[in-house]
Amino acid sequence: MDELTFRRTLYADPRTRQTDVLNAIQDDTHKRRFWEELQAFENEIEAALDIDVPDNLSQKLLLKQSIKIETEARAKQPWYWAMAATIALAAVLSFALITPTTSSLTFDAITHVAHASTEVSKYGPLDMQTVNAKLANYNGTMSDDLGEILSANFCYLDHIKSLHLIIKGETGLLSLFVLPEEGTAPVENSFSNHEYNGLSFLLESTRVIVVGEDESELQSFSQRAREYLSFSA
Amino acid sequence: MTRNIPDTDAVLSDMKTKQLKYEALVKAYHADVFRYAVWLIKDRAIAEDVVQETFLRAWKSLDSLQDDAAAKAWLITILRRENARRFERKAFDLVDIDDVSIADQKQEQGTVAERRDLRVAIEKLSEEYREPLVLQVMMGFSGDEIAQQLGLNKNTVMTRLFRARSQLKDLMTTGVSTEVKASG
């Protein structure tokens, strides 16, 4: 290996393990000295490049992540939208309370919230019997299938216990909440934000709220819900 | 309250796996990513912000990271993109960060003057020489990895690395007050 190539190669990468370079420093004391000098210089460069890292940076990164996820979940106002994601939180909390776990509960919970809609799509469908058993708490029955029901869980909307159904729609997930009208704060008949649309109506003394992304799909879903769901007073 | 334990269990397990992966990523690479950010951005506070954004972005697309060997390069790619976004956002609100010296911000606890001089010399290198050098020495990237990060071919990268060290040698010999200009 000629001197120039040797020097260029080492200057470009002093830590190279290239065989011809390693052979050259074995065979030639002059080259070996050059190599040793360059190693020392490289050590100095490494030291000079070093930057103090704040001791708590990794904790800050993890904290920032948890806060961001929580904030994003909360940003979906008003409460009935937030609940569409938060339903999972209640389930996780209750599960975690009875199950000893070594990892951070809150981390799991809020992480879960942010991803509830994607996670839930892995499950289901539930059969009508299961759904009707839960609807019975509201004296309600479902006469025909509303669609592929992925989950049916109880959750609290503004302190009111409600049943939250998540249904697989054509364009995305649809949510249907069932809650008693009595004691429930007034709800507009239709509402929307940049992401979701919602409709609300009364069936006897039961409030039904449907939330989804596509407005026209939500209209037809709402119509089916009016037909297939019935509640006795 | 009615629960669906098997579903919850499965979801919890998935989320735990992702969370563990993320925590491992943070622990393994936050220091390197921060150090690189300080050299790239030349301001510790801004660097920390950009690192925060980088890891948040990494969390959101964590599923796309399949190869742990590529994790560091993946994070650096995100960091460089986040840093570029910062310039888009703050196009009208920029301090001249070239005037901010990293050497001044480094705590000088027993650091020899020589190291400080070398630090100043590295800062004086033009960006096209400093960037590949930092990626190689600090991040341990290969010539190919640096080429990929900087959108250059490998020969160009190796030439720049050669010139970066040549200039540093010269600077350390002649004194760091000499201004260094890019020469190709």
Image: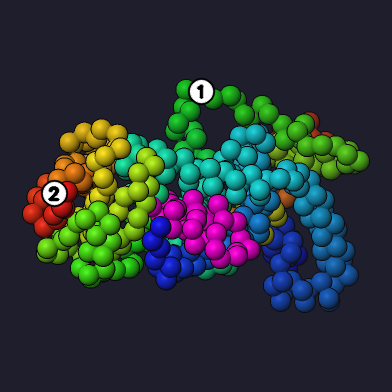
Where is residue A32 shown, x and y percent of the image? 85, 67
Rendered residue at 29%/38% (across/down): A184
Q: Please state if B90 lies on the left or on the right of B47 as rendered.
A: left
**Residue A200 left/right relative to B46:** left
The x and y percentages for residue A131 are: 24, 64
Between marks 1 and 2 in the image, the one whose residue lies nearer the viewer: 2
Q: Amino acid at mark 1?
A: Asp
User: Relative to A27, does residue B149 appear above or below in the rendering?
Assistant: above
Q: Which mark is residue A222?
A: 2
Residue B139 position within the rendered picture, expressed as x and y whole percent measured from the top left = 66, 56
Q: Which amino acid, by three-letter code, is at mark 2?
A: Ser
Please say whether residue A34 is visible from this viewpoint: no
Q: Which residue appears at 44% of the width and 53% of the height?
A: A90
Distance (Cα) linking label 1 and label 2: 49 Å
Subunit of label 1: B
Q: Residues within 10 Å of mark 1 (few under 14, many from 20)?
A: few
| A98 relative to A144 in the view: left or right | right
Residue that label 1 marks: B93
Instruction: Please state which of residues A195 and A1 is positioned toward the viewer in this rendering.
Output: A195
SS majority, magenta = helix
Magenta-colored stretch includes residue A66 = no
State the residue at coordinates (79%, 46%): A48
| Residue span colored magenta | A87-114
Q: Magenta span has A99?
A: yes
**Label 1's element?**
loop
Residue sitting at x 28%, y 61%: A134
Q: Chain of mark 2?
A: A
